[in-house]
Image (cartoon, rainbow, N blue to C red):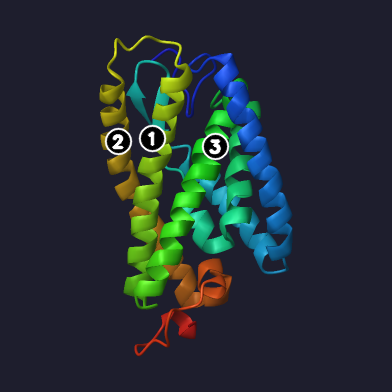
Amino acid sequence: METLAMHISNGIINGPVAAVFAVVALAAMAYCVMRGRQDLDDRLAPMAGLVAAFIFAVQMLNFPIFTAGVSGHLLGGALAAMLVGPWVGALCVAVVLVVQALVFGDGGVAMLGLNITNMAVIGIAVAYLLIALLLRVLPRTPAGLAVTAFVSALVSVVVAAMGFVLQYQLGGTTDLGGNLAGLAGTMAVSHLFIGIGEGLITATTVVTVAKVRPDLVYALRALKPAAPASVPTVGGVR
């Protein structure tokens, strides 16, 4: 693949669609800055730096999807959402994407709005919604936390991949001959396997942190259980 990039490369989506999603991404990040400032404290700020560094590292593992210059890779959205929350988590992912595009040439600079929308906005939003739901119905034990992390990571990766399919339908520059369903199937299946790997990494990381320092897991602090738990919780956090 001569034009292989970690994210969407320049020229994959046309200019008008890329510009629309650039505006969407910019508006979303501005809102995240506003909301994230309310969450930042001496505990969350250093964790955000660690999360961004971890996401940068895992996103270096990428896998070619099809010959138009697009590849699949781990996203880290669910991990960020669980450890630092949706607002700061989205900013962490966005910062990683900007650095990768500007410094390492991973993903087109003109496509930053598309990549940020898919991974920092859609991925984080889906992950955190699932986290909020699952933490209300599952026990806050290591097993319950692991299931929450795994499911949210898996689903968020697949849905974020479908964001690209939508963008390609709106402004893809290569004629697929009406085979958009084939592209969707390829992206879904490949990212299903990627999501399984990401789910295992996310579950292992979050449970490890929760056992040692449950106060560093944003989701455990911010999302209250639906009812008092009758079983021991992770690190004593309810």
The answer to whether 208 appears left or right of 114 in the picture is: left
The residue drawn where x is 58% and y is 61% is 84
Instruction: Determine if residue 6 is in view.
Output: yes
Residue type at the position of mark 2 = Ala
Residue type at the position of mark 1 = Met
- Outermost residue toward the bottom? 230
Tell me the element at label 3.
helix
- Judging by the rendered image, the residue that carries numbered circle 3 is 117
Q: CA distance from mark 1 to mark 2?
A: 7 Å
Lower position in the chain sequence, tag 2 or tag 3: 3
- Judging by the rendered image, the residue that carries numbered circle 1 is 162
In this view, 173 is above or below 21: above
Tell me the element at label 1.
helix
Residue 226 coordinates in the image, percent (x, y): 43, 79
Quarter of the image with the N terminus in it = top left
> Alpha-carbon neighbours of circle 2 within 10 Å: few (<14), some, or many (≥20)?
many
The residue drawn where x is 46% and y is 26% is 167
Residue 205 coordinates in the image, percent (x, y): 44, 62
The answer to whether 122 appears left or right of 133 in the picture is: right
Residue 52 coordinates in the image, percent (x, y): 59, 49
- Judging by the rendered image, the residue that carries numbered circle 2 is 188
Residue type at the position of mark 3 = Thr
> Alpha-carbon neighbours of circle 3 within 10 Å: few (<14), some, or many (≥20)?
many
- Mark 1 touching mark 2, by CB under 8 A? yes
Q: Which mark is residue 61?
A: none
Instruction: Determine if residue 104 is in view.
Output: no
The residue drawn where x is 35% and y is 26% is 64
